[in-house]
Amino acid sequence: MRLRRWGRRIAIALASAFLAVTAASLGYNAVTAGRDVAAVHLYAGPYIRVDGTKLAYRRYGTRGTPIVLLGGFIEPSWVWHRVAPLLARGHRVFALDLPPFGYSQRRGPYTLARWAVLVQGFTRRLGLERPVLVGHSLGAAVAVSIAADHPRATSGIVLLDGDARPGGRAAGWLSHLLLPPWYTTVYRIVTGSDWIFRRGLASAWGKGKPPFTGEFIDEWQRPFRVSGTASALRSLLSYGIQGVSAGVLERVNVPRLVLWGANDTVDSVAAGRRTALLLHAGFLTLPKAGHLSMLASPRALARAIDRFAAATARGAGPSPRTG
């Protein structure tokens, strides 16, 4: 009898807590309902429509060989703002927002195959002939996928802090637990927290003092206010960490280079070396840089990409299977 009474009390307490938290969540969501807006209210463009999807991008430079920069998970094309102007001295540089990141339209599916289609459509729409593809983190897998399946679509690829390998589908089950209204509440609190962003970015920075001004943090937070981002990220999680197999890496037959932040704690230097071996590619580390090497070490990175692009333009890039 005593156990049953305690069981009822616990059940009532849990039910009351559930209702209270749910009510608070619904109230918070109602108060913050006007936070999310259309991308055009946050980023003026340029935009281009590819295969039914409106893509946001940034352009630098007016002459030279084309270079397309592909960011990683939750990275807006703004992350290239220190490297791109340096490259633009001798190249036409395009930084693309892979959906659902940055300001591109939240239109799935958010898969490696779909991203590859969008990147190739993007280069065709802009008339870019065999651009060098630079992929950071998740973007590295996109660059490899294109190079392996459509080698004539690129003159060479650079993998930056990304081994292009899959991380399994461990996150897939999580997407089923991210149910409204709690998920919406947590999403808005997390993506609106300066403290959380500062902690996360600091762990990916490397050595040196990060320039975490209010404007810097805002550039990361603002894309999360684009309408549809919360549901798009939940959909993305269902695919897990996407990448390519070792066999795909081994059949890449265009010039290739792997660059890595020497102090990367997100993706280990050892992982980069393993991918470079599979690709038969050169491997270079960027001193003091962490996972966000394009922000922490822009000059060293720009020099490495520039040399690679110049070599591929001369036809002097790494020959197949020599690295």
Image (spheres, grey):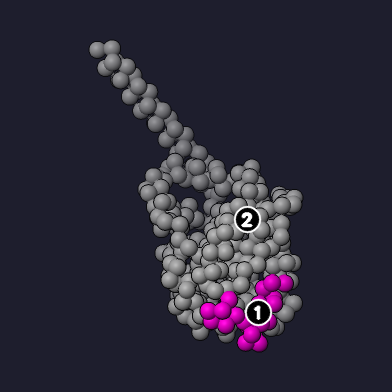
Residue nearer the viewer, 228 or 300: 300
Magenta segment range? 303-323
User: Where is residue 127, by image quadrant?
Assistant: bottom right
Disc 2 residue crowd, few under 14, some 14–19, many 20+, Cα 10 Å = many
Residue 250 x %, y % = 47, 73
Q: Which amino acid does label 1 sit on?
A: Ala
Q: In this view, does 303 lie above or below 219?
A: below
Whether residue 121 is visible here, answered yes or no, is no
Q: Is mark 1 on a helix, strand or loop?
A: helix
Q: Where is residue 66 in the image (x, y as percent from the top left)?
A: 63, 80
- The residue nearer to you, when weighing 61 against 260, is 260
Per the image, label 2 sits on a secondary structure element best described as: loop
Residue 264 bears which disc, if any? 2
| For discs 1 and 2, the disc positioned in front in the rendered view | 2
Callouts 1 and 2 close, C-beta under 8 Å: no
Q: Residue 230 carries which label?
A: none
Residue 70 belongs to magenta span: no
Q: Position of residue 159 (x, y in %)?
A: 58, 68
Q: Residue reaching furthest left?
A: 1
Which disc is residue 309 wearing? 1
At x 69% / y 67%, what residue is drawn? 301
Which residue is rendered at x = 75% and y = 50% of the image? 209
| Dot placed on the residue nearer the N-terminal end, 1 or 2 | 2
